[in-house]
Amino acid sequence: MRIIAGAYKGRNLKSPPSLNVRPTSDRLRETLFNVIAPYIEDARFLDLCAGSGAVGIEAISRGASYVTFVDRSRRMCKLIEANVELCRIPEEQFGIYCYEANEFLKQSKDERWDIVFFDPPYKDDYLKTLQLLGNNGLVIAEHHHKTELPEAIGGLERTRILKQGDSSLSFFSHR
């Protein structure tokens, strides 16, 4: 895994040690950031179910002002720490939280992010989390291409879906 563009372009990141973790591919990350490029500068970005932190680090590299990394696995949180250190990202640009996604969102209900990237294990229940994200800006959920997500849920309405290989990105906006 490597950072594709921006201030940290070309940096190689440490990969998850487990085959149970499915990192977002470089190609899909490039597609994602091509779509959100007009919105990333100075954005507050939430990388939910962050895994290695590659998506959030890419966001910082491309100009996001602050990234919140959330993952329920302590091993993944340590991997995110190692990857932000590897890139020498200043501490004031990120926060790392070792929480289950819904628990974190319930505790942070007054927080708002400009962009949320939600990439849980494909077997997880997306609906509860998407309902909790309804008051944020742009919400992007990565899911298996055969997983059907609703056109609208809570305060969100799907505006776009991109398919690439076995993965899809569903883009939701606040209604």
Image (cartoon, rainbow, N blue to C red):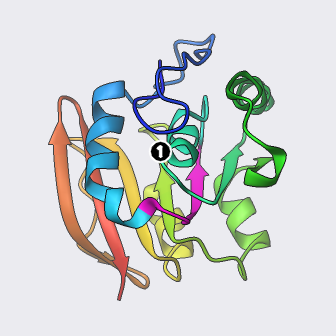
Say if residue 92 shows up in the picture: yes
Residue 106 vertical placement versus 144 (above, below): below
Residue drawn 60% across and 40% down?
A: 50
Q: Tell me which segment is drawn in magenta.
A: 40-49
Amino acid carrying label 1: it is Asp
What is the secondary structure assignment of the residue under circle 1? loop
Q: Nearer the viewer, residue 146 or 44?
A: 44
Q: Position of residue 89 (x, y in %)?
A: 72, 38
How far from the left and from the top, in percent, is residue 124? 49, 45
Q: Is residue 98 visible?
A: no
- Assess whether residue 92 is covered by the magenta stretch: no
Location of residue 75 (image quadrant): top right
Q: Which residue lies at the image location 27% right of the left edge and 48% below the top edge?
A: 34
Identity of the residue drawn at 55% across and 65% down: 42
121 in relation to 99, above or below: above
Q: Is residue 103 left or right of residue 148?
A: right
- Residue 154 lies, with reference to residue 40, above or below; the image says below
Q: Which one is in front, 170 or 152?
A: 170
- Residue positioned most to the bottom: 175
Residue lying at the far front in this picture: please name it: 7
* Mark 1 burial class by Cα count in 10 Å: few <14, some 14-19, many 20+: many
* Vertical side of 73 occupied by 137: above or below: below
Q: Quick check: is 47 in the magenta stretch?
A: yes
Residue at 35% across / 77% down in the picture? 173
Per the image, the residue denoted by label 1 is: 119
